[in-house]
Amino acid sequence: MSLEVFLTGLIAAGFRIATPILLAALGETFAERSGILNLGIEGMMIMSAFTSFSVTYDTGNPTLGLLAGLITGGVMAFIHAFMSITIKVDQIVSGLALTILGLALSTFLFISYFKRTQPAVEIWEPTAIPVLSQIPIIGPALFQQHVITYFAIILFIVSTWFLFGTTWGLTIRTVGENPAAADTVGIRVERVRYLCTIFGGLMAGIAGAYLTLVVFNSFFGGMTAGRGWIAIAVVIFGRWTPSWVFGGALFFGLVDSFQLRLQASGIPISPQFSLMIPYLFTLIALIIVGRKRYAPAALCIPYRRGER
């Protein structure tokens, strides 16, 4: 295998693997910037994967499947927002409950609906961008991806501009840092947190649908394989900024892509150890970067008017 072929495959697979993590992490960045921690991403992703697969299987239309996954993530995020913002229960408990619910309910519904068979849908094919896809190495790696991958990259660019270049972004960051001050100047803190949390759920829904429609073309229990948790880790690694989040997601994707090629190369190494490599590198990166506090000051703290 030539170096060009190896690099092309490594980068292309790295972006494919990074896509669902990047989507979920960018959505979670908005939620946490507003002060809401969502540990239910894993559950939202797998429930969205199930609904996306089921709708696509029944209709033969992956666009409808994607929409179903999007709605599922949004609904579950609304539940988390209601519990965390309106009722003001512990955000960690609410998020964990949704993850446990999503993992169990998706498997139960799949077995109930498909009777332990393992059906499949056609993989949603990638879209090559003319001219750009012909550039050596970079072209096939970056410009022959799926439309959802392109969307994730565009979302990263727009998110950076939105959070740090607009008054709406300043509003979100103010709510996450000092909700009492935001309330004083007329900002509706609860509405901002609701919108950001639901947006995070919508992105987790697209991420789950991506796994079904693009990666696996099927559904099985536990198919998210911790990607929701990795997305949360990437937000911390990324210092709650979209540019660093993008780098963290791509870092994980490239390391995971490398371990897959390591296994395929025939090098005598335990496959269990190879699968552990991306998570090990993520843990090391968190230890190195996580020494300083970059988290919003009001993260996980329910806002009650009149209290500071």
Image (cartoon, rainbow, N blue to C red):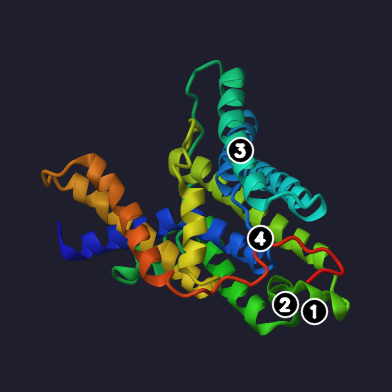
Estimate the spatial distance between the alpha carbons at disc 4 and disc 2, rounded to whole Å: 15 Å
User: Which comes before the other along the chain, label 4 or label 2?
Assistant: 2
As helix, strand or loop, the secondary structure at mark 4 comes to: loop
Q: Residue at x 78, y 66 (%)?
A: 192
| Type of amino acid at the residue the image marks with label 3 | Met
| Type of amino acid at the residue the image marks with label 1 | Ala
Q: Quadrant of residue 308?
A: bottom right
Residue 247: % across, % down: 43, 70
Estimate the spatial distance between the alpha carbons at disc 3 and disc 1, rounded to whole Å: 37 Å
Residue nearer the viewer, 293 or 284: 293
Q: Which residue is drawn at 80% across and 79% down?
A: 181
On screen, residue 109 versus residue 150, left or right, reads: right
As helix, strand or loop, the secondary structure at mark 2 comes to: helix
Q: Is residue 203 above or below residue 4?
A: above
| Type of amino acid at the residue the image marks with label 2 | Thr
| Type of amino acid at the residue the image marks with label 4 | Cys
**On the image, numbered disc 3 is attached to which residue?**
47
**In this view, which residue lies farthest toward the front?**
307
Q: Residues within 10 Å of mark 4 (few under 14, many from 20)?
A: some
**On the image, numbered disc 1 is attached to which residue?**
181
- Labels 2 and 3 touching (C-beta < 8 A): no
Q: In which quarter of the image is residue 155?
A: bottom right
